[in-house]
Amino acid sequence: MGYYLFRRCLQMLPVLFGVVLISFVLFHVVGGSPAVMALGKNATPAALEEFDETRGFNRPLLCGRWTTTRAWPAWAARHGAVGSGPWEGTTGARKDASGAVIFAPGVRVVPLACPLRADTDYRWRLEVRQPSGGTLAVMTEGGALAAAVPVLSRWTEVALPFAVGAGRGNGLRVTVTGEAPLEIRAARMQRRMTHLYDSQLTHYLSQVVRLDFGVSLATNERVAEMLKQGVGPSLLLTVPIFFGGLIVSIALALICAWRRDSWLDRLTVVTAVVLMSVNYLVWIVAGQYLLAYHAGWFPIWGFDSWRCLLLPVLIGLVSGLGANLRFYRTVMLEEINRDYVRTALAKGLGTPTVLFRHVLRNAMIPIITSTVIAIPFLYTGSLLLESFFGIPGLGGLSINAINSADVDVIRGVVLVGAVLYMLANLLTDICYAWADPRIRLR
Amino acid sequence: MSMPAPELPGGNVVVASAALASERGRVWRSLCRGWRTRISMLVLALFAAAALWGEMAYRWAQACDRTPSYAQVDLGARYLPPSIFRHPFTAAENTTGIDVSAASKLRAGLRALARHPLGTDNLGRDVGRRLIQGARIAFQVGVVTALIAIPLGLLLGLLAGYFGGWVDDVVVWLYSTVAAIPGLLFILAIALVVGKGLTGVYLGIGLTTWVGLCRLIRGETLKQREQTYVQAARAMGLGHVRILFRQILPNVFHLVIITVSLRFPAAVSTEVFLSFLGIGVQGEPSWGVMLGNARLRLWQGMWWEMTFVTIAIFAVVLAFNLLGDALRDALDPRASAKGEL
């Protein structure tokens, strides 16, 4: 048994890794900038940079020495381009017809969108030419002048490393020497990483290993704290739904299977299909409006007393009943036609004994499969029920997070949900062995 | 004179297609037997027709470059209940101030009733027309998500079941991973990352729902791989691709049909959910958008939009559920009525 558990846990690792990988790809690779997604397009570069710094988004994706910075976004000349982009506010720069920027010899100041970091080096990669040759040097305001780099008369890419000085400054001082003006076709500024593998992936993996789910954008709370606080209300809502639904649907299914093809059975099956087909949203909206608002039987909204939970639990029960009932009825029907049931009845055992001691016990395996697998979904609660009835659980939390693009919260909920799902899978197998002595775990 | 050797694979195909045709006939006859199936097919035909009509109305309005009829705001006709709840004599407002005969009053009233048979919403937009546009969106979502999920699940399931080994390991790893992530949240996250709009809905639903089919197809292919017809095909020297797609695929295809009939209503419901949350379709009426709007207006006594949307979703989903049951009974009698995939 111990060995079995150990082996199963090892088997869970690749799936866990897959989940981490998928969430990484989803939020780091596909999604564009999470900072822009969360803060909006009009946020200042400094705010975006801070968002990226706290969440590790301002690093190379997988590995690398250099990474982009928001202080001076990458730029390339486009034919007939209008506007000056990052060159906005540069003294003495003009553009020619092809969009390239032209610097006359002398000292120019290029403004930066946000201050640079003092703890690391930067470099500026430029695609430049200067017809009669010359040199180019760059320094931050207050920093030390770096060595000048020669510029050729054909287009070449030069890298200008510079250190951030004490002043940090809001601008770069560019010194151009030579006869003819300097032309720049493309430019990007990069920040040097202290470590080659200091990347988004490693940052994320280390976060996951430390069970650190980050900080919520909306409330600035730690996501782990929020998850902890949300689990309670969610369970208060979903556990009654879960067990109530289980008991009601299994009882009804047993009755249906016992009285199969009677009017009761037919009615139940038809009702189950009808219940299944009503949209979940409709259950909630209609229930809240008719039962709580019109009839006044339940509180409409809130989480003050146990009475507030009655209506959500009722709605959850009814909306899940149809599908469960149909499934359990099929399972029971399969069992009830077996020989051992006929034998038990022929021996003179009472109906309840046969139903509960024999049929239910044998129908346990499929019931366990469908039940235990549903357990992890208890923890997210019901997304809609919670947000409609104002229950401060994980479901409402997730909906709010989706609405405000709170990446860290969503990621946290997804990761914990996935881990619980895998544990439930393991629990299912253990329950098999408990329900059916013929199954041995090795 | 020696007989030309019969080309076995070709002959096989002829026999197989004849058998398939008679099989199709059997399935079709067994489908048409029940009145429930007939009614659901009728409902689905109506649904498809509404979707087509909605698409045409949408394209027509685009081609003419004017506001489509379902989006026309008429502030003079807000909150009109459905026609049967309006009085034909007072439906038309008498603006002339002249006392007219009862007959002409009735005529004008009936004309007014015919304009908005299902009533109007809070901006005076016609509920019936918006409902038809909603059918169009729902149909699109069902079809496009199926077009994403079905090929993905089918191909991966076939490859995993047929080749086994590391291919199987990778596919099983992939679907276990996707299955482990809470479904609705995964869809929401994809929709969030892709951005608001139908593309997010398509990708979210499509990329998460292939798992069930993949699992089914893989299991069935594992079984079929050991059958004699596959061994015979292999002995005849047919290539893997040909065995997979010409021999095994027709034998597992019933699972695809059953899955589509179950997935379609689920996709429609998910779209309703996403649009209700404001992540789905933007700027166009879908059933979810209407439901969200109707929910707010319900407190002001506007019950009809809510009711009609509910009926529309209910009818379509119920029809699919009934049809799915019938299909399963006809195509795969041994499969349990599990309902979940």
Image: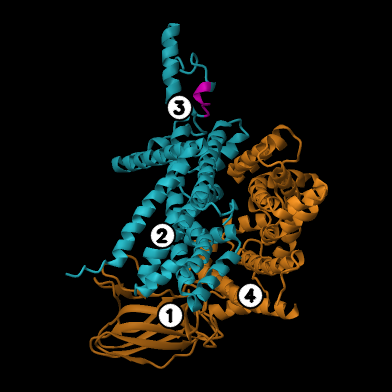
Chain colours: A orange, B cyan
- Horizontal side of A74 relative to A368 (left or right) equals left
Q: Which residue appears at 58% of the width and 59% of the height? A: B183
Q: Nearer the viewer, mark 4 or mark 1?
A: 4
Task: Identify the residue position indicated by label 1 in the image.
Answer: A189
Q: CA distance from mark 2 to mark 4?
A: 35 Å
Dot 4: what SS? helix
**Residue range (magenta):** B79-84
Q: CA distance from mark 3 to mark 1?
A: 61 Å
Mark 2 residue type: Pro
Q: Nearer the viewer, mark 2 or mark 4?
A: 2
Q: Choose between A277 and B109: the one closer to the eye.
A: A277
Q: Chain of mark 3?
A: B
Q: Residue B21: x percent and y percent?
A: 37, 50
Q: Chain of mark 1?
A: A
Task: Identify the residue position indicated by label 3 in the image.
Answer: B116
Mark 1 residue type: Met
State which quarter of the image contains the C terminus of chain A: bottom right
Dot 2: what SS? helix
Q: CA distance from mark 3 to mark 4?
A: 58 Å
Tell me, yes or no, whether the two marked residues, 1 and 2, touch with CB atoms within 8 Å.
no
- Horizontal side of A8 relative to A239 (left or right) equals left
Q: Is residue B77 magenta?
A: no
Q: Which residue appears at 76% of the width and 57% of the height? A: A361
Task: Identify the residue position indicated by label 2 in the image.
Answer: B250
Q: Which mark is on residue A108?
A: none
Q: Residue A31: x percent and y percent?
A: 49, 66
State which quarter of the image contains the N terminus of chain A: bottom right
Q: Is residue B45 visible in this depiction of the protein?
A: yes
Q: Which residue appears at 45% of the width and 47% of the height? A: B27
Q: Is residue A105 above or below residue A216?
A: below
